[in-house]
Image (cartoon, coloured by chain):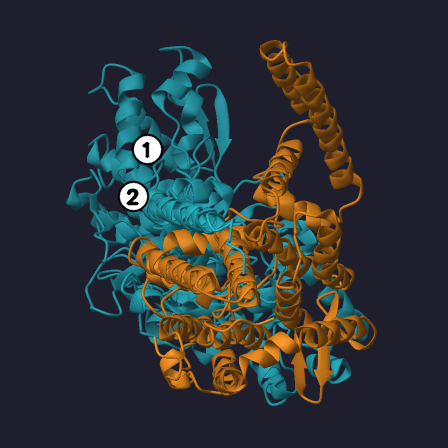
Amino acid sequence: MSKDIFKNRYNIVQAIIVTFAVIFVLRLFYLQVIDRKYVSLARNNAVKELDVYPTRGYVYDRNGELIVYNEAIYDLLVIPRQAKGIDTVKLCELLGIGKDDYIARMATMHSAKGFSSYKPNVFMKQLSLKDYSRLQEYLYLFPGFYGQVRTIRKYPHRCGATILGDIGEVDDRQIEESKGYYKPGDYVGKSGIEKVYEHELGGKRGKKFVFVDVHNREMGSFNNGYFDTIARSGDNVITTLNIKLQEYAEKLMANKKGSIVAIEPGTGEILALVSSPGYDPNLLCGAVRGENFKSLLTDSLLPLYSRPTLATYPPGSAFKPVVALISLHEKVQGINYTVPCNGMYIFAGLSLHCSHHHPSATNIQYALEQSCNPYFWQTFRNAIENRAFGSTGESYGKWVELCHSFGLGIRTGVDLPSEVSGNIPTVHYFNKLYGENRWHSANIISLGIGQGEILVTPIQLANLYACIGNQGYYITPHIVKRITDPETNKDLTRHYEKHTALIDAEHFPPVVEGLFDVVEAGTARAAHVNGITLCGKTGTAQNPHGDNHSMFAGFAPKDTPKISIAVIVENGGFGADYAAPIASLLVEKYLNDTIQTSRLPLEKRMMEGNLLSKYGVKTNKTLKMNLEGE
Amino acid sequence: MARNESLTGKIDWITVMLYAALVFIGWAVIYSSVYTDEGKSIFNATTNSGKQFQWMIGCVIIGAIILIVDSRFYVTFAYPIFGFMLLFATSVMFIGTVVKGQRNWIHIGSFSMQPSELLKFSVSLGVAKFLSGLNVDIRKWKDKWKIFAVVFVPAAIILIQGDAGSAIVFSVFALVLFREGLEPYFLIVGAAVITLSVMALVLSPAIIAAALAAITALLIYQLKKKKKIIWYIVGIYLLSTGYVFSVNYGFNKVLKSHQKDRINVLLGKEVENGKDWNIRQSIIAVGSGGFWGKGYLNGTQTKLKFVPEQSTDFIFSSIGEEFGFVGSTFLVLIYLALFYRLLYLAERQRSKFSRVYGYCVVGILFFHFLINMGMAIGVAPVIGIPLPFISYGGSSLLAFTILLFVFIRLDTQRYEQMR
């Protein structure tokens, strides 16, 4: 063979090969050693952070009765890629849906944002345990379909919606305020104690880091769960409610608008709190929530309105004990102060009428029993025209201050989400209305019998009578008695303040006696119960829009009160018509646990009392929904 | 060295060891890419690694047979083998099965394979046979046309079958021909064409035309005395400008959109969302390996299926991720050692046939290495060809084994003159 003249090309080929090898090594060095961004890119690909939702805390009544718990419901999920060639007819039959519905659900799912046929998609939301167990038997026939358990709130007693509240999806503002804790789609308390105690009931979310594959399927725990945090269950809450009393109170208020608030005077614990018409709290849980919420929101009877803390009424005669106590304390009159009453009170050119004829009151006790208007006009006048003060403004200012010390005109501080302060008109208010120093007792005389600008909320009224029953103090009314961490049993209860009325203690007994006589022999005889020393006062709040509001506030027993109560039935007429009997039934039920046979007809009459025509509606839409609920 | 040594003594064991190292690395990495926590055995025949193991046993048998057969057989039957494979490959166009849009699979019973893999082997034999012929001079156009036909006819058949990736491999024979005397300007023009093509796609053709005009003007000014050269320069200028415009036209009008996307991805141009997924995930996999790698069986990118075709075309991304810069460089060095060893063996052949065949083996292996690994690290276009001896797949492993072992057999008789 001739000499190989191209031998040197061997080296060129070698050079070409080594050049590319060097280029590759340099490129690898750049990718793997210099540019570190690929490590996090791979991590972001493969590791996802998932939230682990805690179970919400349970709620109990004061006797340990479970009133709110969580129930398992099932979302039916489907991984479309795996659900091929299934018997859709059978599936539809088991789910109780039509073929069109099946097709529509599939179509909605496919057009949803972020749809992936590899990922589980919600096919049907919130199947009940009953429906799901029927399906579960046959689930093996439908590969790709499976149930995912979730929890919804359940209210076995179907009452107390205003207090217990509801949970719903978090709104944008809350998401912003939570600084990233809440995410769209999270559930939080929306009203009632669910809202106020969201922090305690809601628990703390945990985090779980998992590997996911390219189809976003979970492929096991990342780093053996080293970075995971466990979800902390919500705290259990023991409320001050007596759920039996609450149920009974709601029954008595059927077909009537109004409020009931019952408080244990010694502790400020709320025993029952009714906003009527109410609704079954289960209506706002689960799949039916959206529709029911809309329906409740548009109901003309305003079932979602928390009347006990938001509605305000002129207290009328129920305010008279305050007028009496202030004047006694100010020493502008004694216990045996007399005001002659012949049915007429003539003052500053005004002639005012007493509500009924009765012998003239020669002491405060009898004046209360008879609810004598002239007596309290005069009593109020005495306080305002008190010579110890330099001017009407000064004396009235003092009077307002003393009212505030009963928790009137200020918020009670109850642990419910929204509350108004009612109204005790201020000096400033009258100065603006009439001009400074240009008003005197005659201008404001109607305040003496709880009319005019004075407004109270039902909870303030119940609290006021707790204070009178306690003879001089009240404790901030509250719904939650105790909070315990279910894991550590640690007591997380809030402290509630004791407030003292700025009235000397000696002035309370005659007033309490007077209130006792009201029920024994006076205007609230309808509330008399044998064996119970119920003290109280009726009120008839004037209502320019229709029939007067029937009102009663009181406490029992007289000496060591266990319950104070305020009942307001809108358009219910005189206090004695509805409010006083209802209050007496509640007190009897609470103290005796049973209603005397002789009073059963009264109970029946109260429960069946129907004022819907006065509210311009034929049927109570909400009540109907309640019945359909089961 | 004694000529009457036993066969085992004459086998180049360095090459065999490098080959075995690559095959075992491949097998281990295939296991990693299919590995799940369920812990199936590497031998489990339902998994890719188990199947690859069966192919490996097949390769031992085939390799042994190849080494037993006399070298002269391959020389003598070079053309018949070449002719038969050409016919076989052609027949695939009519009786083959379409897989992923390419009609290049043949099924015989439960056995399926891609004839295009073996075609590279037979073309190598054909090229070696032709060039080792008496009085063949590649510098003469008479012989050039013939050798071009030997290379391009099979390439065209594969291209028609839709396997552009394998067809491109045949361009590597230019390197073999260069070694055997093909004029360097073929390589220079080839390199220039590739450079111009890339520029034509990255920049606007008008800019390149202007730049070329400026260079031409500068050259003419510098060489204004030499009239003859100026005409050459002007001619080259016109040709390259025309080429740039036609590449641009061809790219936009002739190429299919997925081909355009692949090129665009490589050139770092914006592509429709997701079209560069494969390459991006592969680069992430390799890059996230870092210096030492994530450790064997710990690659998240590959294990969680972010990288597609992870046991075949993108197998290097598994290696890069799990073994890091150290492991990747080690692999590059093994390949480099193999290529250098094979070049060394080729150069020591007395027979021209064996030398040419040896260069063909190096060229084919090198080109696969270049494209496959280059693709995984984002410096070569996405062309679906396997990484020799490592990628999962029976036909490719078998074909590369046959290709290599025939050369090892030829090398055992390196002192003989064969035609």
Is residue A316 something that shows in the picture?
A: no
Around disc 2, counting alpha carbons within 10 Å, would you say few (fewer than 14), some (14 to 19), or many (20 or more)? many
Around disc 1, counting alpha carbons within 10 Å, would you say few (fewer than 14), some (14 to 19), or many (20 or more)? many
- N-terminal of the pair, mark 2 or mark 1, is 2
Image spot of residue B73 (x, y percent)? 60, 81
Chain letter of the residue beneath label 1 in the structure image: A
Q: Residue at x 65, y 21 (%)?
A: B212
Chain letter of the residue beneath label 2 in the structure image: A
Q: Please state, as top left, top right, bottom left or bottom right, where the N terminus of chain A lies in the image.
A: bottom right
Q: Which residue is mark 1?
A: A379
The chain drawn in orange is B
Image spot of residue A186 (x, y percent)? 47, 55
Q: Secondary structure at mark 1?
A: helix
Q: Which residue is mark 2?
A: A364
Q: Colour of chain A?
A: cyan
Where, by quadrant of the figure, is residue B340 drawn?
Answer: bottom left
Q: Amino acid at mark 2?
A: Ile
Q: Is residue B121 above or below residue A418?
A: below
To the question of a shared chain for discs 2 and 1, the answer is yes
Is residue A19 something that shows in the picture?
A: yes
Q: CA distance from mark 2 to mark 1?
A: 9 Å
Where, by quadrant of the figure, is residue A233 drawn?
Answer: bottom left
Image spot of residue A426 (x, y percent)? 36, 24
Q: Decide if residue A392 is on the left or right side of residue A161.
A: left
Residue nearer the viewer, B241 or B145: B145
Residue nearer the viewer, A411 or A386: A411
